């Protein structure tokens, strides 16, 4: 990432991430398609709120790995091989511990969280079963993200793609086998996903044990280095807090959607699956920019970092808006894939056509946040997103929904807060010396 044509580097790095995220979306898409069409709208509603709850549990830990990736990318760009190895092995050790914690927390607190979210009584038993089985595979989820973060930090986005393709195909096969053929119900759907996630984690870890590079993992060296862990936490905790609090805000949003019943949950859950596809170019370029900026600032190539930032922002925004326009136009057809009941389709189309046209704002915020994280400014995205995507979003919904008790009020919370965060990020990006003010690790 520190040599060659900037646009080529970023695009070639982003494409495997995009494709990997695309296959990862198959996990939730296949869940919804099979569950919605085989088991019906109540079962679809049970898994439809999965994104907010899962991210609430895993978001903090994954934020730590974002910080780890920034540090590893910085060492890699600076060719500091000794500290690179320490960072990699500390990250793996922390991932194992974090995976065990996520498993325990998810299985223990799922019923309480679902009840706090106001999950309807007719949906609750299936929701509890699904999420408890899903979080039984918490270690696999966390360890895959750990390995993926290490690969991406050193500029390798291809191997995570390979492993996701394998696990996604496996997930499709197992989903159809367990639910459609063996009739294991919603539990079979969760088990299929867990098995596929563990396979991707095992493949990633096995590759790190064999890779020919300075980031190779040696079993005997997997341990927590106290000083390095402190650095990882300092860099990652702001993003972890940001992820968790935003996820909490989204749980509040989901709670308000739940109040409109299982039909609204199913329709909005179907939209959330489509939204996951729209986010692919956004997340791809955000991750690419974090790695690109981290490596180039580590190598002290400041002008190259600036040029890469400008290219990534423009490309990410244009791609996201293009996808948003397509979703807006095809919403009725796409929502119908998940469930063909008119009321379900109506809710899904309503949310799609409220939010999709504003994906350019979401992309702008994420790309600018990715740049600042790569520069070590992880607290800035945290502060901006906590204010806009959490405090303002929750306040808006809590007040306006009482005055105007319509579900559209909930939908508008997203584009309004995307706009506010974009404005603040642009001001900081233009005014602050984020290129030269980063501190060496």
Image (cartoon, rainbow, N blue to C red):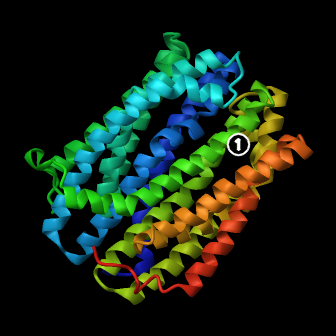
Q: Is residue 359 visible?
A: yes
- Name the residue beneath numbered marker 1: 253
- Picture quadrant of residue 180: top right
In the displayed structure, 241 sits above or below 6; it is above
> Mark 1 Cα within 10 Å, few/some/many (few <14, many 20+)?
many
Closest to the observer: 291 or 397?
397
In the displayed structure image, the side of residue 249 where residue 302 appears, left or right: left
**Dot 1 lies on which element?**
helix
Q: Where residue 83 appears, x then y in whole percent?
A: 17, 66
In the displayed structure image, the side of residue 232 where residue 303 appears, left or right: right
Residue appearing at x 38%, y 38% in the figure: 141
Residue appearing at x 46%, y 52% in the figure: 19
- Picture quadrant of residue 104: top left
Residue appearing at x 68%, y 60% in the figure: 359
Closest to the observer: 177 or 362?
362
Closest to the observer: 187 or 373?
373
């Amino acid at each position: 990432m520190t040599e060659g044509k900037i646009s080529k580097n970023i695009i070639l790095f982003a494409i495997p991430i995009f494709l990997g995220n695309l296959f990862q979306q198959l996990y939730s898409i296949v869940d919804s398609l099979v569950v919605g069409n085989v088991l019906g709208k109540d079962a679809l509603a049970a898994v439809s709120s999965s994104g907010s709850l899962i991210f609430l549990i895993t978001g903090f830990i994954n934020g730590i790995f974002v910080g780890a990736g920034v540090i590893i990318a910085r060492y890699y760009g600076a060719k500091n091989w000794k500290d690179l190895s320490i960072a990699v092995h500390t990250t793996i050790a922390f991932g194992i511990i974090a995976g065990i914690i996520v498993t325990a927390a998810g299985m223990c607190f799922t019923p309480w969280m679902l009840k706090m979210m106001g999950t309807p009584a007719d949906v609750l038993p299936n929701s509890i079963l699904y999420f408890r089985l899903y979080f039984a595979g918490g270690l696999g989820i966390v360890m895959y993200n750990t390995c993926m973060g290490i690969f991406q930090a050193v500029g390798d986005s291809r191997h995570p793609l390979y492993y996701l393709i394998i696990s996604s195909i496996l997930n499709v096969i197992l989903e159809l086998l367990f639910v459609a053929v063996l009739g294991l119900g919603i539990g079979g759907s969760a088990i299929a996903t867990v098995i596929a996630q563990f396979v991707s984690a095992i493949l990633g870890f096995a590759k790190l044990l064999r890779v020919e590079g300075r980031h190779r993992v040696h079993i005997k060296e997997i341990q927590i280095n106290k000083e390095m862990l402190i650095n990882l936490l300092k860099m990652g905790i702001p993003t972890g807090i940001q992820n968790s609090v935003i996820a909490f805000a989204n749980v509040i949003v989901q709670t308000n959607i739940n109040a409109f019943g299982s039909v609204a949950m199913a329709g909005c859950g179907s939209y959330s699956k489509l939204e996951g596809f729209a986010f692919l170019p956004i997340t791809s370029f955000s991750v690419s920019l974090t790695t690109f900026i981290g490596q180039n600032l580590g190598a002290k190539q400041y002008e190259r970092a600036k040029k890469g930032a400008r290219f990534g922002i423009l490309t990410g925004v244009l791609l996201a808006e293009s996808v948003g326009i397509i979703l807006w136009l095809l919403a009725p057809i796409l929502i119908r894939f998940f469930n063909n009941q008119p009321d379900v389709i109506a809710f899904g189309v309503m949310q799609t056509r409220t939010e999709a046209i504003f994906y350019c704002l979401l992309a702008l915020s994420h790309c600018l946040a990715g740049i600042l994280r790569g520069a070590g400014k992880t607290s800035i995205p945290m502060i901006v997103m906590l204010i806009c995507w959490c405090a303002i979003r929750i306040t808006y919904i809590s007040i306006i929904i009482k005055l105007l008790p319509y579900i559209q009020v909930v939908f508008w919370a997203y584009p309004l807060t995307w706009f506010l965060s974009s404005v603040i990020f642009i001001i900081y990006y233009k005014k602050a010396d984020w290129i030269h003010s980063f501190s060496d690790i």
